Image (cartoon, rainbow, N blue to C red):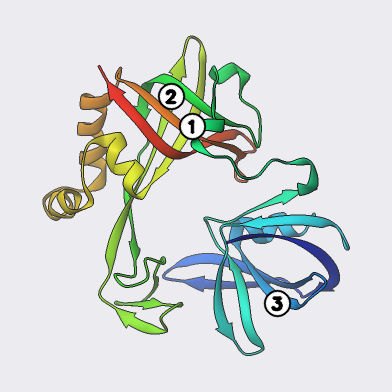
Amino acid sequence: DSASKRWYPVLFPERQFESNGRAGKVINFEIADETKTVRVAAWNEIAEYIKNVSVDQTIKIEGGYTKEGLNGVELNLGWQARIIDDPKNVVIEKTANDFEAKQISELGEFMSAKVKAKIKTIENGKLHYFVCPDCGKKLERDAEEFNCLSCKQTKSPDINLVVAMTLQDGENTIRAVMFGKQAEKAISISKEEMKKILEEKNPEEIVQELNEKLIGKEITAQGTVRKNNSNDENELIVQSVIALTG
């Protein structure tokens, strides 16, 4: 899902579209290293970001997924993807033992750290996204069908949890995002339990109940700070929830 690439001068025009009543955009371009050239599709926010990337600029792509296209295997950059400029100066991978305890005020982009802070609020959101029950990749929805681009089949979807919350220590705050098992740990609800809850309540009701239960609790989490492309603010992408107390 991540590899350093060098940008070559092949950039195709932006294409706008509408899906399920929502407007979107995609830009196709090519990347290459010493071994191969690959076509890439950047969607929505990432497409907007791509406009500012220079020809022949060295970048690092994370969180993409591959699928078979008309011209062979293509790399897709959706909502989970990000692009790092000048990755040679960035430490990308760390083990759990490398995470240093930091205050929120000390956090900077690309920094990996362990943070202990109080939960200020749980953000409104769907709390889940649909994934393939076989390969675990995110599913694309077409009308009433869910299609797995990896398995190339229509699937009955499973879900993964996703939770965003604001953490606070002292006067400082940061948005933290948890996926899958880490989201389950953060709210103490398994995905199987969430499936049943979603049958009875809408996400807004569930978030309200989570806020009543979790605000003021202390959470210890490890993750990496990245810049949110939509608001240009730092957020913590959580890789491990260590403890939830209080």
> Which image quadrant for residue 102?
top right
Of mark 3 and mark 1, the one earlier in the sequence is 3
Q: Residue 30 in the image: x percent, y percent?
A: 76, 73
Q: Are marks 2 and 3 in contact (CB under 8 Å)?
A: no
Q: In this view, does 71 lie above or below 117?
A: below
Mark 2–mark 1 distance (CA, rounded to whole Å): 6 Å
CA separation in Å, label 3 and label 1: 33 Å
Answer above or below: position of 140 versus 198: below
Q: In which quarter of the image is residue 7?
A: bottom right
Disc number at residue 167?
2
Residue 141 spot, x, y in % from top left: 38, 72
**What amino acid is labelled 3 in the image?**
Arg
Between 66 and 216, the one nearer to me in the picture = 66
Return the residue at label 3.
Answer: 39
Q: On the image, numbered disc 1 is attached to which residue?
A: 175
- At label 2, which amino acid type do we have? Leu
Contact between marks 2 and 1 (CB within 8 A): the answer is yes
Residue at image coords 61%, 39%: 226
Q: In the drawing, does residue 218 fall left or right of residue 79?
A: left
Q: What element carries label 3?
A: strand
Taking depth in this image into account, of 110 and 147 the one nearest to the observer is 110
The residue tagged with tag 2: helix, strand or loop?
A: strand
Q: Inspect the image, locate mark 1, and give the three-letter code of the amino acid beneath it.
A: Arg
